[in-house]
Image (cartoon, helix red, strand yellow):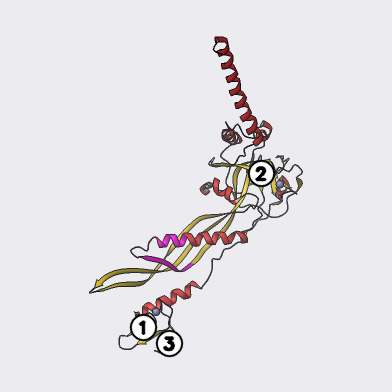
Amino acid sequence: MPDVLNYKCPCCSAPLRYDGGSGQLSCAACGNTFPLDAVQQAQQVEDAAQEQGIQWDTERDDQWRPEEAQQLKTYSCPSCGAEIVVDDTTAATECVYCGNASIMPGAVSGSFRPDAVLPFVKTKEDAVAAYLELIKGKKLLPRAFASKKHVDKITGVYVPFWLFQCRADCDLAFRAERSHTHTRGRDRITETEHFLVQRGGTLDFDGVPVDGSSKFDDTLMEAIEPFDYSKMQDFDVAYLPGYQAERYDVDAQDAQGRANERIRTSTVEAFAATVVGYTSVVPQSVNVRLQHGQVVNVLAPVWMLNTKWNDKTYTFAMNGQTGRLVGDLPVDSGAAWKYRLRIFLGTLAGVVGIAALLGFLGVI
Ligand SMILES: [Zn+2]
Ligand SMILES: [Zn+2]
C-alpha cells in the first residue's frame, strides 16, 4: 500500500506510515495511530475546503421602462456626489445628504432600476414628531436645529441596499478535542482524544442585507435596522411621488464580499452549535454551495434630516417602517454660555432680592 504514505497526520500534518501489524496508520511525530478510513475522510475534508467560493448570479434587468423614464427625473449633487431619482411631480431643492442648494437636474438614464421596494409606513408627521421629541428640552441645542423651516426639510428617502437570498448546501468539518487527566502512581497523565466532526445540511438565507449607498453611513443604517422584508413589493414608480430615491453607488459585485462573509459566519455559528461535548472545537473546513443565489436591489424607507453646523453634518434618521431612529445632536457652546449666564444672573437677582428684604427688615 505505498500510496498510503501520501497521507498526512490529521493531528500534526507529519507523513503517516502504514503499520502492517495493526493494520493502522501511525505517525512517528506525535505517536498517534489512525484507521485508514478516518484518515481518508480527513483528507476529503481538506480537499473540499479548497474547492470553491460562493457564486452569485448578479445578472439583473435594471433598465427603466421607457414610460417610467418619462415620469422621472434625477438630481445630482456636485458637492457630495449623491444622485437621486424623483417622480416629475416631486420637487427637490437641495441635496438631502449635504444640504447643497445647487443640485443639477437631469433626465433618467437607461439603467439603475430597483427590483423591489419597502413602502413607507411612518408619515412625515410621525418623523417630525419624533424629531421634535428628540430635541425637546435640549436647551443647549444650536438654534439651527429647531427652526420650523429646518424641521420642515425632513425628507423621505428610499435608501438602496442589496438583499442576497439563497439556499445553501453546507459541508463543514470541525477539529474537536476532549482531554482527561488522571494519575497513575506518581504520574499525572493527560490524554487528549482528537475528533474530526463532520456536519452537513441546508440553510435558507431569506435575505442578507448589504448597504448599496456610500452616502448613507453603514453605522447609521445598522442603527435603524432591521427592516421587515416580508413587506417587500415589486418596484413600481407609484411608490415614488413625494419621496426621493437614491441611486445606488455600491454595485452588486462590490457588495458580494460582505454578503459572503456574513453567510459564512452564520453557517459556522449554526453548525458549531451542534458540536457539543468537547473541550475545544475549531472549524477546519467550510464548504458552502448556493442554490438559487439571487441578488435583489431594494429601496428601504428612511426619514432623514441632515443639519450642518460648525462644518460638521449631524444626521437624524428614522426607519420609515418601524420608527426606530438615530440622531446625534451637538451642544452649542455659545448657547451654553448664554444658559449659564442666565442662571448666574437669575441667582444674582435672587441674592439682591434677599439683601433688599433683609435691609428692609433692618437686619443689615
Ligand atoms: Zn502526528
Ligand atoms: Zn450633496
* Residue 180 horizontal/vertical position (percent): 30, 69
The residue that label 3 is drawn on is 3
Residue 271 part of the magenta segment: yes
Query: Which circle marks residue 26 in the picture?
Result: 1
> How many badges with numbers are in the image?
3
Q: Which label's residue is closer to the chain start, 1 or 2?
A: 1
Secondary structure at numbered mark 2: strand
Q: Which label's residue is closer to the chain start, 3 or 2?
A: 3
Classify the position of the C terminus by image quarter: top right
* Residue 137 horizontal/vertical position (percent): 57, 31
* Residue 19 horizontal/vertical position (percent): 34, 87
* Residue 264 horizontal/vertical position (percent): 50, 62
Mark in the foreground, 3 or 2: 2
The residue that label 2 is drawn on is 313
Q: Is residue 59 visible?
A: no
Amino acid at the residue labelled 1: Ser
**Which residue is outermost to the left?**
185
Residue 51 part of the magenta segment: no
